[in-house]
Image (cartoon, rainbow, N blue to C red):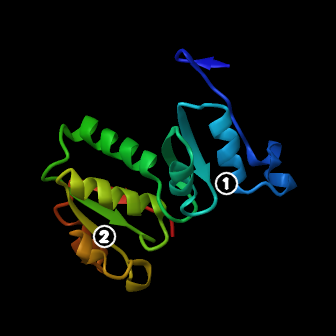
């Protein structure tokens, strides 16, 4: 059907040839033959949207891939913060919980740091990714210290 003037085709794995053994590259060839302008891809396999972007002529938007990233959620989170706080640059954003296993946290860290927020992650050492400080992020293992002077708090599941 049409949405906002665009012809939209929803493809689910359950209804596709993936159930019959079609690979992601086979799907890419099919999508290319359909001459799509844009693909919004949510896939259980980490890296699938990136692989598709290399194999199709259409623009590809990553709507979440495995445990890797979820950039569209990060964009929504950044927009929400900006609407409520009026800006992102200079804000202290604390991301708390299981940061190591969260694709949403990973995408938020990259985007918020790029947009000038001062990001800190808060959680026990086992739930904080190794070398996250290299991304320009402060690490706190004490919740009270990590939340002190935070402008925004993002809570993740454990």
Q: Which residue reaches farthest left?
A: 90
- The percent position of residue 108, horizontal first and vertical second, equals 35, 56
- The percent position of residue 110, horizontal first and vertical second, equals 31, 59
- The percent position of residue 11, horizontal first and vertical second, equals 71, 39
Res 25 label: 1
Circle 1 crowding by C-alpha within 10 Å: few under 14, some 14–19, many from 20 = some
Res 96 label: none
23 relative position to 58: left or right: right
Quarter where residue 106 is shown: bottom left
Real-space Cα separation, disc 2 to disc 1, in angstroms: 37 Å
Quarter where residue 148 is shown: bottom left
Kind of element beneath mark 2: strand
Residue occupying image coordinates x 44% and y 45%: 72
The one nearer the camera, 125 or 40, is 40
102 relative position to 128: left or right: right
- Compared with residue 10, is residue 6 higher up or lower down, i.e. above or below? above
The one nearer the camera, 158 or 28, is 28
- Compared with residue 131, is residue 55 higher up or lower down, i.e. above or below? above
Kind of element beneath mark 1: helix
The one nearer the camera, 97 or 49, is 49
Residue occupying image coordinates x 17% and y 53%: 116
Circle 2 crowding by C-alpha within 10 Å: few under 14, some 14–19, many from 20 = many
Residue occupying image coordinates x 30% and y 53%: 111
- Compared with residue 154, is residue 81 higher up or lower down, i.e. above or below? above
Mark in front: 2 vs 1? 1
- Reading the image, the residue beneath label 2 is 121
- The percent position of residue 83, horizontal first and vertical second, equals 27, 35
């Amino acid at each position: 059907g049409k949405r906002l003037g665009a012809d939209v085709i929803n493809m689910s794995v359950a209804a596709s040839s993936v159930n019959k053994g079609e690979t992601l590259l086979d799907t890419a060839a099919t999508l290319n033959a359909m001459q799509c302008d844009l693909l919004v891809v949510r896939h259980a396999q980490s890296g699938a949207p990136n692989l598709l972007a290399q194999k199709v002529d259409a623009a590809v938007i990553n709507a979440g891939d495995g445990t890797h990233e979820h950039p569209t959620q990060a964009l929504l989170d950044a927009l929400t913060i900006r609407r409520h706080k009026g800006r992102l640059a200079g804000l202290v954003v604390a991301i708390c919980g299981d940061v190591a296993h969260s694709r949403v946290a990973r995408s938020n860290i990259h985007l918020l740091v790029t947009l000038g927020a001062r990001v800190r992650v808060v959680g026990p050492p086992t739930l904080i990714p190794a070398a996250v400080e290299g991304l320009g992020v402060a690490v706190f293992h004490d919740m009270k210290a990590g939340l002190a002077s935070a402008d925004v708090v993002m809570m993740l599941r454990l």
